[in-house]
């Protein structure tokens, strides 16, 4: 079976970073003997650089990667980024018909333009396609705005909402990072019943264990609090630094990653002996860091719209209980499984309270760590999650296309 995967922003093998969703799915599909092509662009969202100066193509890990040259951009929120998405969609629309048609297409949402291009291609040729929801565009834009301007924003986003409804009206099915995102897509497809399934953002547990080496012994002394991720506006590291100031020598904060906020955050942390900025770490160094921690932190700003994020199972696979500011699906999961704790987003005092409680009961913290690993193996192991997702794609291909709905 010939399978096409289309994504505008995810890593590919030559990037040398940890695999994410579509690399995991590509591996699983190739492992089933399918002919897999992963379509993306030369521009890499995470580094804001072009991987290659022109269109490029190569094979790795048993599948083909096709990159189309488009526009770059510097800021995540900008007209230039919208133009980049539009250009990539145009390049896809021109390039896809030149190749033998696939049996099924899986497209990542966002961006809308890319998914719309794939939907139009599939509808014209009777090819079933699956939409994988990473972020519910355009609704997420409206939700991030102040309440006073949301009604106006909803009116302005009507064309984008219409585009999203058209996509889901023609899709064979939907997959997503969370139950909330599947339900969102199904509401847009109504009154048609849209089949859907949740596949959590999984962690490569086997790869992590190999890189981390022998299980590290947690150090006695101050609680080792680990954050690993982007240093950008989506994450409330200001709250973490305020908490570090309040806890003093009772905890040590290890912050791994890079991003546009790094210089400002480091200046804000001046004089804090219990905070260390480690910069960008390669996969092996990151695995060793996670294995040496006591607890992890998933710090999102008040009003954050994320549901279930990659950080969850990456931390849990490393036996790190997660202290999380999200109140919805991810926060409820952490509480239900007993693998961490929650704090009020933006409240450094509440975060300090939670960390003090964890530091005071190291026996319970150890039990949380064991539960964390068991839960990661059961629900967040990349081989299992993306193997199941590959099976879902197989079923979509066998079922055939859905008739276009206006």
Image (cartoon, rainbow, N blue to C red):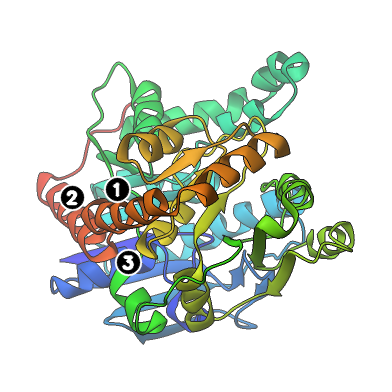
Residue 99 shows in this picture: no
Q: Is residue 139 above or below residue 95?
A: above
Tell me where residue 370 appears, x and y as whole percent: 30, 57
Disc nearer the start of the sequence (2/3): 3
What's the mark number on residue 199?
1
Disc nearer the start of the sequence (2/1): 1
Q: Secondary structure at mark 3?
A: helix
Tell me where residue 57 appears, x and y as whole percent: 45, 82
Marks 1 & 3, CB-CB < 8 Å contact: no
Q: Residues within 10 Å of mark 1 (few under 14, many from 20)?
A: many
Relative side of 59 to 14, left or right: left
Disc nearer the start of the sequence (1/3): 3
Foreground residue, 266 or 361? 361
Residue 223 shows in this picture: yes
Relative side of 401 to 352, left or right: left
Q: For the view shown, which residue lies furthest in the left direction?
A: 398
Q: Is residue 178 above or below residue 227?
A: above
Which residue lies under the disc numbered 3? 24
Which residue is at a point 61% across and 62% down the rendered structure image? 222
Q: Secondary structure at mark 1?
A: loop
- Disc 2 to disc 1, how far (Cα)? 10 Å
Instruction: Say how many tags the image has.
Output: 3
Relative side of 390 to 233, left or right: left
Marks 2 & 1, CB-CB < 8 Å contact: yes
Foreground residue, 178 or 195? 178
- Disc 1 to disc 3, how far (Cα)? 12 Å
Which residue lies under the disc numbered 2? 392
Q: Secondary structure at mark 2?
A: helix
Q: Residues within 10 Å of mark 2 (few under 14, many from 20)?
A: some
Which residue is at a point 67% across and 32% down the rendered structure image? 302
């Amino acid at each position: 079976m010939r399978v096409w995967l289309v994504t505008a922003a995810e890593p590919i093998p030559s990037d040398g970073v940890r695999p994410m969703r579509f690399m995991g799915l590509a591996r699983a599909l190739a492992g089933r003997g399918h002919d897999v092509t992963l379509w993306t662009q030369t521009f890499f969202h995470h580094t804001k650089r072009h991987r290659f100066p022109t269109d490029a193509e190569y094979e790795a890990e048993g599948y083909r990667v096709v990159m189309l040259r488009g526009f770059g951009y510097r800021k995540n929120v900008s007209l230039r980024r919208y133009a980049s998405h539009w250009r990539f969609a145009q390049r896809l629309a021109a390039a896809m018909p030149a190749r033998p048609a696939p049996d099924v297409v899986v497209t990542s949402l966002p961006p809308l333009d890319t998914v719309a291009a794939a939907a139009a291609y599939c509808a014209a040729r009777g090819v079933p396609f699956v939409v994988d929801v990473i972020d519910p565009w355009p609704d997420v834009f409206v939700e991030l705005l102040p309440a006073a301007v949301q009604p106006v924003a909803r009116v302005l986003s009507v064309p984008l909402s219409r585009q999203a409804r058209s996509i889901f009206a023609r899709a064979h099915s939907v997959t997503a990072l969370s139950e909330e995102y599947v339900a969102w897509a199904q509401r847009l497809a109504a009154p048609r019943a849209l089949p859907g399934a949740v596949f959590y953002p999984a962690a490569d547990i086997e790869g992590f264990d190999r890189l981390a080496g022998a299980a590290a012994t947690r150090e006695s002394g101050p609680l080792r609090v680990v954050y690993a991720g982007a240093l950008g506006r989506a994450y409330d590291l200001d709250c973490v630094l305020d908490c570090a100031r309040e806890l003093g020598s009772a905890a040590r904060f290890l912050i791994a990653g890079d991003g546009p906020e790094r210089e400002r955050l480091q200046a804000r942390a001046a004089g804090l002996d219990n905070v260390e900025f480690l910069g960008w770490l390669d996969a092996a160094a990151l695995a060793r860091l996670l294995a040496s921690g006591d607890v992890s932190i998933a710090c999102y700003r008040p009003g954050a719209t994320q549901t279930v994020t990659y950080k969850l199972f990456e931390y849990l696979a490393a036996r790190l209980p997660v202290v999380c500011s999200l109140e919805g699906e991810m926060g409820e999961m952490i509480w239900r499984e007993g693998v961490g704790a929650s704090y009020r987003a933006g409240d450094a005092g509440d975060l300090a309270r939670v960390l003090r409680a964890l530091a005071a009961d190291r026996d319970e913290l150890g039990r949380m760590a064991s539960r964390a690993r068991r839960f990661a193996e059961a629900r967040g192991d990349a081989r299992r999650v993306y193997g199941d997702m590959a099976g879902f794609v197989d079923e979509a291909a066998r079922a055939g296309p859905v008739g276009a709905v206006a």
